[in-house]
Image (cartoon, grey):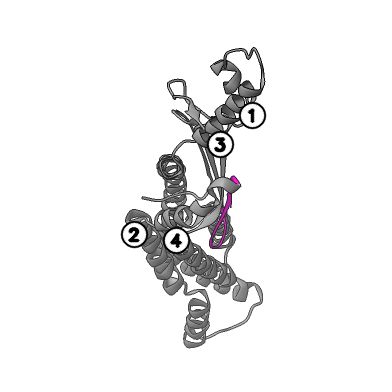
Amino acid sequence: MIRSMTAFARQSEQLEWGALVWEIRSVNHRYLEPSFKLPESVRSLESNLREKLRSQLSRGKIECGLRLQIQATGQDANLAINQVLLEQLVSASESLQQKIEQPSPLNPLELLKWPGIVEESQPDSEAIGEQILAAFQTTLNQLLESREREGTVLKQFIEQRLQTIAEITASVRQQLPQILTAQRQKLKDRLDELKTDLDADRLEQEMVILAQKADVDEELDRLDAHVDEVNRVLTKGGACGRRLDFLMQELNREANTLSSKSIVTDTTQAAVELKVLIEQMREQIQNIE
């Protein structure tokens, strides 16, 4: 499967202790460069998050952001009483009552209003960590799916250009004998215009030299071989962006050689079209993982 390096994923979840939102953005990059924006309370999870990321991605600049909203207590949570402080308050209250002639009865509700007597119930930090990691994996899966969808589009784009390159190469190969024949006739016509006598052997030598200069069979063979290799790499899939980029350089080299050996405008135009197609593919391959 071909994957693009450009994608976005977002996952929000409502949990018993609060809410979380993960956002992951991915753009093209030569290497894998992850960055995390995490609340300080869960900063200890970063090493695990990086490990998950590196195990499933190989290239791209990845920005991962987490937002947390932790509630102190749930709807069904019981009040947690600070027993030590409560005993101190009751003891102090009883001591005061002994010194007052007509003390009022101790009101439990008043005790509950005392600062610190009711402790806030904090959720289990280990459970929160596990849920954060699970939500990250869900978001990462969404990112991978998005990258794969984009990769499928890129693959089709490249395959279309490869097909056109193969057609141009076949056309140039088919035209070569006609081109050489036309050049031979052109040379003879030119000699006739100049009223120059040239024996058959000399004419044949000139044609051999011309044929050698115009011989692009090797370049056409290499173009075909590179097209086959690009198709093979696309079919194999995986992290192949660097390999494809190298093959684009090789294709471009052969197109340049074809252009330099051209002796007619048709071949020159074919070389130009090849370079345009190769550049279009190269631009898209920059986004392939």
Q: Which comes sooner in the sequence, label 1 or label 4? A: 1
Residue 112 percent coordinates (x, y) = 57, 22
Amino acid carrying label 1: it is Pro
Q: Which comes sooner in the sequence, label 4 or label 3? A: 3
Q: Nearer the viewer, mark 4 or mark 3?
A: 3
Asked whether residue 92 appears in the rendered view, the answer is yes
Mark 1 vs 4: CB contact within 8 A: no
Q: Name the mark on residue 68.
A: 3
For numbered disc 1, what is the local secondary structure? loop
Mark 4, residue position: 175
Q: Which comes sooner in the sequence, label 2 or label 1? A: 1
Residue at the image position 34 percent from the left and 59 percent from the top: 232
In the picture, residue 86 is in which quadrant? top right
Q: Which comes sooner in the sequence, label 1 or label 3? A: 3
Quick one: 58 or 4, which is closer to the camera? 58
Vertical relation: 52 (above or below) 253:
above
Magenta part of the chain: 27-39
Q: Nearer the viewer, mark 4 or mark 2?
A: 2
Amino acid carrying label 3: it is Leu
Mark 2 nearby-residue class (10 Å; few <14, some 14–19, many ≥20): few
For numbered disc 3, what is the local secondary structure? strand
Residue 219 percent coordinates (x, y) = 46, 71
For numbered disc 2, what is the local secondary structure? helix
Mark 4 vs 2: CB contact within 8 A: no
Mark 2, residue position: 232
For numbered disc 4, what is the local secondary structure? helix
Vertical relation: 73 (above or below) 216:
above
Vertical relation: 74 (above or below) 129:
above
